Amino acid sequence: MLTEERYHLILQRLQERSIVKLQELVDILGASESTIRRDLIDLESRQLLKRIHGGAALVHQKSQEPGMDEKTFTNVQQKDVIARLAAQELLDGECIYLDAGTTTLAMIPYIEAKDITVVTNGLSHVEALVHQQIRSYLLGGMMKMHTKAVIGSIALQNMDNFRFDKCFLGANGIDAEMGYTTPDPEEALIKRRAHELSSQTYILADSSKIGEITFAKLFSLNEAVLITEAMPEQWQRSIAQKTKIIEG
């Protein structure tokens, strides 16, 4: 099969499914793993896809957000490191907010603090919290099917019933000038309100989000502690000057 034919089929598969695994491409295209890896590197250099752990994903525009299923398979090892670090910030008896997202979801099995109360807008989070026998509240409102996050005016009204010692939020973009950003303005409202109701805010984001800017601003860098698995060298100085960083 010619290289351009492989490229066409790879991109076609991505358009259909948004994410594709490396082994799946090997099976479909009948090419070696090393060949497919080179193809993905070349397509990424053309900004036609983004390589992720074990495969590739579509490149998203600033207003587009990956779905929960796609994010589950993205940067898995990095998220695990971040989740462990975040869980260590919890103290016994605290009331916290967990944002809907795969990195905050990964925190839950690592929570060792006793007698904590969790409020969340993540459907998957409540299931995991119940499994861990952690007292939890799910915000009411409109369920965003793409990310399994509760959003909207009803969720914002629900949020005002609570006050938090700490909140843990995800962000899709972290930039020294633009601060923390996320693709969906509706979700941005929920994240921002949780931040306003919390004594301390943590942003959980893997290093691929650093230097990125998406559509809706949450707040400035100095308003939260950033937890990441590693700070890219080119952003180390500009970001570290503006916020505290916890890294693995």
Image (cartoon, helix red, strand yellow):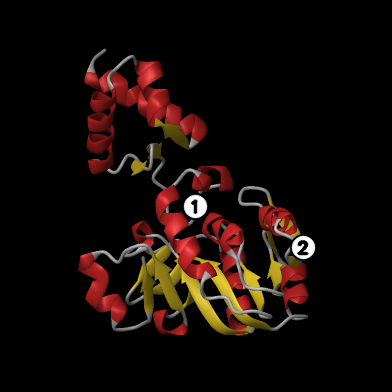
Image quadrant of residue 192?
bottom right
Residue 155 lies, in percent from the top left, at: 74, 68
Residue 3 lies, in percent from the top left, at: 23, 21
Mark 2 touches mark 1? (CB < 8 Å): no
Q: Residue at x 56, y 61 (%)?
A: 110
Q: Residue at x 55, y 47 (%)?
A: 67
Local SS, label 2: loop
- Which residue is identified by label 2? 141
Image quadrant of residue 191?
bottom right
Residue 176 lies, in percent from the top left, at: 32, 75
Left or right for 165, reference 13: right
Q: Quadrant of the C terminus?
A: bottom left
Q: Residues within 10 Å of mark 2 (few under 14, many from 20)?
A: some
Q: Quadrant of the N terminus?
A: top left
The kind of residue on which mark 2 rests is Gly
- Which residue is identified by label 1? 64
